[in-house]
Image (cartoon, helix red, strand yellow):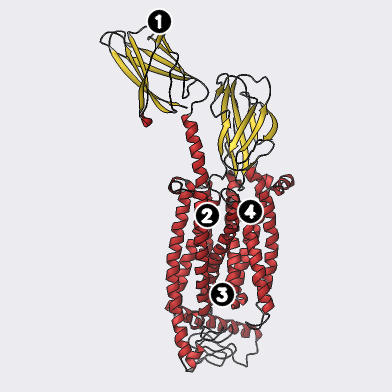
């Protein structure tokens, strides 16, 4: 049974890595001064960057490099944030030469994800540059993949740990003494703790150098501990230690209590303490990831804690139920019913908190379908719908399991009473094995007794089960061997009785299907935590759209070849629009012949049309300054946008042509 969950975990881990590999982070660069691609006449005193959300920048968070690759900035970072505007800058040195400069920046967004980028601007005129930027961005490569896997394992470990404990406390108290359930919870704690420690060590290279060796650098680790994410991971490790004490008490004194009413103070203390520890662990995610930034963080963080706790109660409890159904033949029907009610409540909490978080992170219908975050969210909703559908089937099997228990409670014969559950009146065990551990199955001998029909001598056989020892066996080795055979026969019989119950078999299959969907669902959820929320992505897209329609601070040059079809009817028209923005512009038009020299033409017309706003054509009045040269002192373009330039050239009375070119005007 352990192979299938391990395979599903591996597949989901690879899926989570693939999904998160294309993900962006929460904060993004929305503007800069000078702008990307701008050409300025003189060197600016400072380069500034504006972000969509709060970011953390190191001393070298912004670097300005000369065409030769030397540093052009002073190295001192200035915090220029004011109100909702998040802006940082660096001063430039005096006496910078003309040419193309590269601005490289690297930061950590408020929700813990590394971001980086680069752009260029030119002083005087563009030039070649020797700057070579690293290809690997922060958060990528082997370190990024390991960090994503660690993130997934920590989520899965917490879900199994918290959900398994909740299943035992709220649904199946006897499960505290069942070894497979104890192992499941212990594995969840180990996975959660080991993944948290790995995340703490990988955090430095994940947001910085990207070198795996830096994970063992104590200096890098000290720098991580000074960050908010480092503090959250450290708190998570400390809470993991407290959780270990809780698990020890749950599977120790709590499992050994004599009855349901025994040591109520222990039960109450474990319930309150476990809830506080689980909420504290969930709070470390809420304080350091998406919930801590953006819209309404004061409300989003506590709701995120509730969301994570509901996920753990539902999905982690489901994993514990799957283990119990496969490995423990005597789980009570009442326990399955209690988990069904617990899961229903958890789903209700998930629906309410998930709806709010979706609105907060997406914000619009267009972002739901037009961004990576929105599409991942739709995928998650689809998986949840599948999970609810399979869960509905499981509830049907649960109701069928409850029917024999109700029938048994109404019966008066001994067989009916033997099928009742061991945890209380009318709560028969699933599959008809309701007795407490150690109790005999119907028709099965108790340990130490001979099976009906079995031989009593050393060579006796019973219904094909092999030799059975009698009371006179003196060889301890032989006695131990025969005892193991008897135990194997008893286990096989209990499993046959368990598997003979169609309701139990159906419930096992549906729960296994739910568990498989859960593994993939956790992978998609992990990818969502590293993906740019739709609301922020749309903000960045709008800023980039504005930048795309804006022409840098330099004249717009357009070269158009023409051919009127007549003799000597070929040449080139060159237009220069200065400064190339909406409003008043100076337009210069030069006409050259095939030899590259200026040439006159019989007529030249220029017009501008903005089709998207139905403006134009706006005819430009040209004045001839010299042979082959025309100018317009005021070529006014009222709005920015994608303007269509229409140039008509006539070289004779009958030979003319019209050429068209689109150009973006800011």
Image-based side of 205 in relation to 535, left or right? right
Q: For mark 1, does the 10 Å Cα neighbourhood hold few (<14), some (14 to 19), or many (20 or more) residues?
A: few
Q: Please provide percent x and percent y for residue 581.
A: 48, 24
Residue at (44% x, 82% y) in the render: 403
Residue 556 in view (yes/no): yes
Q: For mark 2, does the 10 Å Cα neighbourhood hold few (<14), some (14 to 19), or many (20 or more) residues?
A: many
Q: Quadrant of residue 370?
A: top left
Task: Kindly report the distance in space between the C-alpha atoms of the residues bearing marks 1 and 3.
Answer: 95 Å
Residue at (66% x, 76% y) in the render: 267
Query: Can you identify the residue that label 4 sits on?
Result: 287
Residue at (52% x, 47% y) in the render: 533
Task: Kindly report the distance in space between the C-alpha atoms of the residues bearing marks 4 and 3.
Answer: 31 Å
**For marks 1 and 3 on the same chain, the one whose residue lies earlier in the sequence:** 3
State the SS at label 3.
loop
Query: Can you identify the residue that label 2 sits on?
Result: 357
**For marks 4 and 3 on the same chain, the one whose residue lies earlier in the sequence:** 3
**For marks 3 and 2 on the same chain, the one whose residue lies earlier in the sequence:** 3
User: Which numbered marker is on residue 338?
Assistant: none
Q: Quadrant of residue 42?
A: top right
Task: Kindly report the distance in space between the C-alpha atoms of the residues bearing marks 4 and 1.
Answer: 71 Å
Query: Can you identify the residue that label 3 sits on?
Result: 171
Query: Can you identify the residue that label 1 sits on?
Result: 627
Q: Please provide percent x and percent y for residue 663.
A: 42, 25
């Amino acid at each position: 049974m352990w192979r299938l969950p391990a395979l599903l975990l591996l597949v989901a881990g690879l899926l989570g890595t693939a999904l998160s590999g294309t993900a962006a982070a929460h904060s993004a660069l929305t503007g800069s001064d000078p702008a990307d691609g701008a050409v300025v006449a003189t060197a600016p005193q400072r380069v500034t960057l504006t972000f969509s959300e709060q970011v953390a920048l190191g001393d070298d968070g912004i670097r300005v490099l000369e065409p030769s690759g030397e540093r052009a900035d002073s190295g001192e970072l200035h915090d220029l944030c004011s109100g909702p505007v998040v802006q940082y800058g660096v001063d430039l040195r005096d006496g910078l030469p003309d040419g193309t400069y590269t601005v490289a920046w690297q930061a950590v967004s408020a929700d813990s994800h590394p971001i980086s980028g680069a752009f260029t601007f030119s002083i005087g005129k563009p030039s070649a540059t020797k700057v070579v930027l690293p290809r690997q961005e922060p958060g990528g490569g082997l370190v990024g993949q390991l960090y994503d896997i660690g993130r997934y394992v920590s989520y899965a470990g917490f879900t199994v740990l918290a959900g398994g404990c909740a299943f035992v406390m709220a649904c199946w108290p006897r499960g505290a003494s069942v070894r497979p359930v104890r192992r499941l919870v212990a594995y969840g704690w180990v996975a959660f703790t080991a993944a948290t420690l790995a995340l703490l060590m990988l955090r430095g290279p994940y947001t910085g150098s990207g070198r795996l060796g830096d994970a063992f650098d104590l200096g890098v680790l000290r720098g991580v501990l000074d960050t908010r994410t480092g503090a959250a991971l450290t708190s998570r490790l400390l809470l993991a230690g407290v959780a270990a004490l809780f698990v020890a008490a749950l599977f120790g004194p709590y499992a050994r209590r004599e009855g349901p009413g025994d040591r109520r103070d222990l039960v109450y203390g474990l319930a309150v303490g476990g809830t506080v520890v689980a909420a504290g662990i969930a709070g470390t995610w809420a304080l350091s990831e998406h919930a801590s930034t953006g819209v309404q963080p004061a409300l989003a963080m506590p709701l995120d804690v509730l969301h994570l706790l509901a996920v753990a109660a539902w999905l982690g409890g489901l994993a514990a139920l799957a283990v119990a159904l496969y490995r423990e033949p005597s789980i009570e029907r009442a326990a399955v019913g209690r988990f069904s009610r617990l899961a229903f409540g958890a789903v209700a909490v998930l629906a309410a908190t998930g709806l709010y978080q979706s609105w907060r992170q997406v914000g619009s219908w267009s972002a739901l379908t037009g961004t990576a975050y929105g599409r991942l969210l739709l995928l998650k909703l689809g998986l949840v719908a599948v999970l609810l559908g399979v869960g509905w089937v499981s509830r049907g099997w649960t109701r069928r399991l409850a029917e024999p228990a109700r029938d048994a409670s109404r019966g008066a014969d001994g067989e009916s009473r033997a099928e009742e559950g061991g945890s209380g009146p009318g709560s028969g065990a699933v599959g008809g094995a309701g007795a407490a551990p150690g109790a005999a199955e119907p028709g099965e001998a108790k340990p130490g007794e001979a099976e009906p029909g079995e031989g009593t001598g050393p060579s006796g056989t019973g219904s094909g089960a092999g030799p059975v020892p009698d009371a006179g066996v003196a060889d301890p080795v032989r006695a131990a061997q025969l005892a193991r055979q008897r135990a194997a026969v008893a286990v096989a019989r209990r499993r046959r009785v368990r598997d003979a119950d169609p309701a139990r078999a159906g419930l096992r299959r549906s729960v296994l299907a739910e568990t498989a969907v859960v593994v993939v669902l956790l992978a998609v959820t992990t990818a969502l935590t590293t993906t740019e929320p739709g609301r922020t992505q749309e903000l960045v897209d709008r800023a980039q759209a504005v930048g795309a329609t804006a022409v840098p601070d330099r004249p717009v040059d357009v070269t158009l070849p023409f051919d009127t079809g007549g003799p000597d009817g070929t040449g080139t028209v060159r237009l220069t629009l200065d400064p190339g923005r909406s409003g008043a512009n100076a337009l210069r038009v030069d006409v050259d012949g095939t030899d590259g020299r200026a040439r006159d033409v019989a007529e030249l017309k220029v017009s501008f049309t903005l089709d998207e706003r139905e403006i134009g054509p706006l005819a430009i009045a040209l004045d001839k300054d010299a042979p082959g040269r025309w100018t317009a002192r005021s070529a006014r373009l009222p709005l920015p946008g994608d303007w269509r330039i229409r140039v008509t050239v006539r070289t004779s009375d009958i030979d003319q042509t019209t050429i068209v070119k689109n150009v973006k005007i800011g």
